[in-house]
Amino acid sequence: MEVTEDRPLPAVRAILLASTGPVFCSGHDFADFSGRTEEQQREVLAACAEVNMLLERVPQTTLAAVNGLATAGGCQLVASCDLVFASSSGGRFCLPGARSGGFCHTPAVSLGGRVSPRKVFELAMLADEVDAAEAARIGLCNKAVAGGREELEKEVDAVARRLCQRFGPQMAIGKQVLY
């Protein structure tokens, strides 16, 4: 959605992605793909790509609160958000494709816009998990929040409130310009 000075802004001022369980997002269930045609598989992957691109195109700031594992397509989802916060006690990130002889193609491409190429290569080829502190160090998340879910929720709530107070046409246009 393109924002202009004369187009009204949506009522929603920020978008938050979070989980309630031990996994933030695990990406695709490739067992589900086994019964689909190649065309159906492509449609699923295209829909997922559209969701990730939409996170950058919407005028609102998108936030991810990661308290659990963000793996494969889940890691891609995180990389597509504008701001990412992860709990130091539970936030973890991984591109696991190489563990089974595969490769996390599209997640690696999305990480390439946030993380150095050498680090993306390492994550994709070695399939190691990184914790919240390492994710913050390499630019995959903005901040590793000390503590667990409760501390993460407080931090993200405070940031979201600040964003909502400042949200307006210039902020939305600024996001478009940055991307």
Image (spheres, helix red, strand yellow):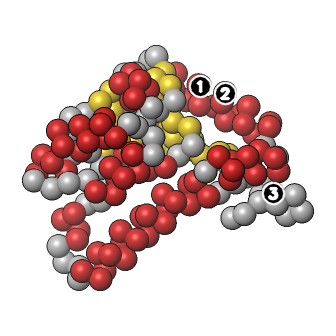
Q: Is residue 20 shown left or right of residue 12?
A: left
Residue in view at x 10 percent, y 53 percent = 101
Quadrant showing the N terminus: bottom right
Residue in view at x 50 percent, y 25 percent = 143
Mark linked to residue 9: 3
Task: Tell me the SS state at disc 1.
Answer: helix
Q: Could you tell me residue 48's position as x and y percent? A: 42, 64
Depth order, front residue of 171/146: 171
Give the residue type that dot 3 points to: Leu
**Mark 3 and 2 residues: CB-CB less than 8 Å, in contact?**
no
Q: Could you tell me residue 97's position as x and y percent? A: 19, 50
Residue where numbered disc 1 is placed: 154
Any part of residue 22 in sight: no
- Looking at the picture, does residue 84 appear above or below residue 178? above
Q: Residues within 10 Å of mark 3 (few under 14, many from 20)?
A: some
Q: Distance between the residues labelled 3 and 2?
A: 22 Å
Mark linked to residue 12: none
Residue where numbered disc 2 is placed: 158
- Looking at the picture, does residue 24 appear above or below residue 27? above
